[in-house]
Image: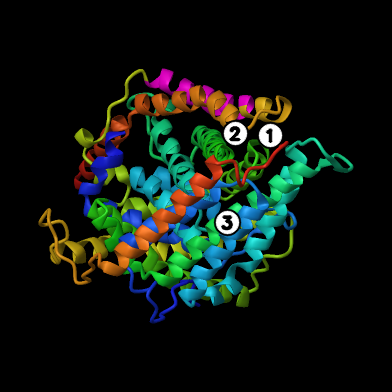
Amino acid sequence: MREAFAMWRHTQMVVLVALSAAIYAALLIPFKGIPLVPGFIEIRPANAFPVVFGLLFGPAGAWGAAIGNLIGDFFGTLSLGSIGGFVGNFFLALLPYKMWGAYFRSGENMEPNVDSGKKFGVYVALAFLSSVIGAVIISWFIDLLGLIPFTASLLLITPNNAIMAIILGPILLLALYPRVKRWGLLWTEIMNPEEVSGSRLQKVGNVLVWIGGLGAAGVGLLISYWGGIQGLGVGLGLAPFLVLIVVGSFMLGGREQVEAAEELIAVEEEESRA
Amino acid sequence: MDPSLYLDRDTWVHHLDPRTKIFLLLGMFVLPFVFLSPLYEAAVLVLVLLFGYLAKVLENLRRIWFILVTIALLTVILWSIFGSGQTPLFLFVEQEALLYGISIALRIDITIIAGMIFLSTTRNEEVAIGLVRLGLPYRFAFAVSTALRLVPTIVTTGLTISQAQRSRGLDLKSGSVVQRIRKYVPLLVPVFVSTIRSTNVFSMALESKGFGASPKRTFFLQTAVGRRDVLTLIAFTALLAGSVALRVAGYGGLEGFSR
């Protein structure tokens, strides 16, 4: 996770945090959502952005999604629950870029785009998992505060995040990735390898995040809905799974993506010179 | 279209130091969590509304009333279903669960109204400087304040693009859910591209003006904690302590409710 703090040294990354936060917050306002259950559940197009921000801008995208969600709350719904929204959205954008490298072998093209069947499959899986984890974190926090029952908020937030990220995200990524790459704004191009934490047992870390995410959602629903336990009970029940997610995220690293990007740039420069 | 909630008024609340306002906001977030009885929550709501009245910003309630009502109704319904009590009321709903739902609805609405009052009395620049003075890194505060400042511009761009695409025949209201979702692409891509393409110029402009050149920086906006701030904080701390004492003494709870 070193890069989440080291990125603040780069002016470009600071600007990317500000701009991605502004885009995320701003798009929550003019484009009304599509109601799934009128009056209760609506999906908003802006929800496609955190995963895309994470893959393109890495840690800057994660901070951007977190701050953007907080700023969205600034326009009417700022409350104690906003803290959960901040952390949940941070992980919603953080996990896709952290986990992306775990699905590609060393030397394989691991550009965060969806221009192949394998990459599309990885994108969909990661968008789904990060949506579940983001929703688990927010639901866990607001249930702990005694505001909304875990089951209800998890079932409201997960589809809200996942549907847009899965349907709209790949199209956005296909359209935006070449431009962002051309402008030299991919996080792997801005940050240096030594500023990014290296992976330790990357595959194990990947499995831990999956177990943590799906386990937290499953066990949370089980003890909250069928077990009738809420508040601190849900909080304690989910704590081990949330620890797995955090530990897994630390193990995933990300340096290999930066090194792969550097190699790719070197090859492209050599080709253009030739 | 300006989505900002800030209202420029000449009141003592507006003149408080941003740090004082941030502490008051945090305190207002804590206060409703002290009690569980709807009656006591209603008293806290009255107090918060009185504070908003003194700050002359209650007109912003008109902008968020729909959110407040929707959240309140949803919360009461949810807790009536998920909570349980001892006194049957109707069907499967128990009186204690309904009362708890009302309390939680008031609790959420109080925190949202407190947030609204904070944003209605504090300019973006003050939020940023308040965060820095409280010890947050300047670069983080800069990102927050820049994003806040850019939101109205991007909203306007979004609306312009939306109107332009609709005039070309884009219809967001027809088709299946998946088709309707895909129709947002011609709206989202231009907003993203028009904003992100300025990153490099923005970064160069910042660095040419010495952004990050020195670890310690000065600010155009000067803020200071004065006597008014100290008195306000003392009064609020006394109120919070009094509320906790009341709760410890056995007032403001809700008997018979279980989650």
Question: Can residue A65 be seen at all in this image of the molecule?
Answer: yes
Which amino acid type is marked by label 3? Pro
Q: Nearer the viewer, mark 1 or mark 3?
A: 1
Q: Secondary structure at mark 3?
A: helix
Q: Residue furthest front?
A: B249
Residue at image location 58% in from the left, 46% down from the top: A161
The quadrant in which the C terminus of chain A is found is: top left
Q: Which residues are magenta?
A: A202-219
Q: Residue furthest left?
A: B214
Where residue B87 sits: x, y (%)?
A: 82, 39
Q: Residues within 10 Å of mark 1 (few under 14, many from 20)?
A: some
> Which sits in the foreground, A9 or B184?
A9
Q: Are marks 1 and 2 on the same chain?
A: no
Q: Residues within 10 Å of mark 3 (few under 14, many from 20)?
A: many
**Disc 2 designates what residue?**
A231
Q: Quadrant of residue B6?
A: bottom left
> Which sits in the foreground, B161 or B70?
B70
Q: Are marks 3 and 2 in contact (CB under 8 Å)?
A: no
Q: Secondary structure at mark 1?
A: loop
Q: Are marks 1 and 3 on the same chain?
A: no
- Tell me the chain of label 2: A
Question: Can residue A170 be seen at all in this image of the molecule?
Answer: no
Q: Secondary structure at mark 2?
A: loop
- Tell me the chain of label 1: B
**Disc 3 designates what residue?**
A45
Q: Residues within 10 Å of mark 2 (few under 14, many from 20)?
A: many
- Tell me the chain of label 3: A
Which amino acid type is marked by label 2? Gly
Q: Are marks 1 and 2 in contact (CB under 8 Å)?
A: yes
Which amino acid type is marked by label 1? Arg
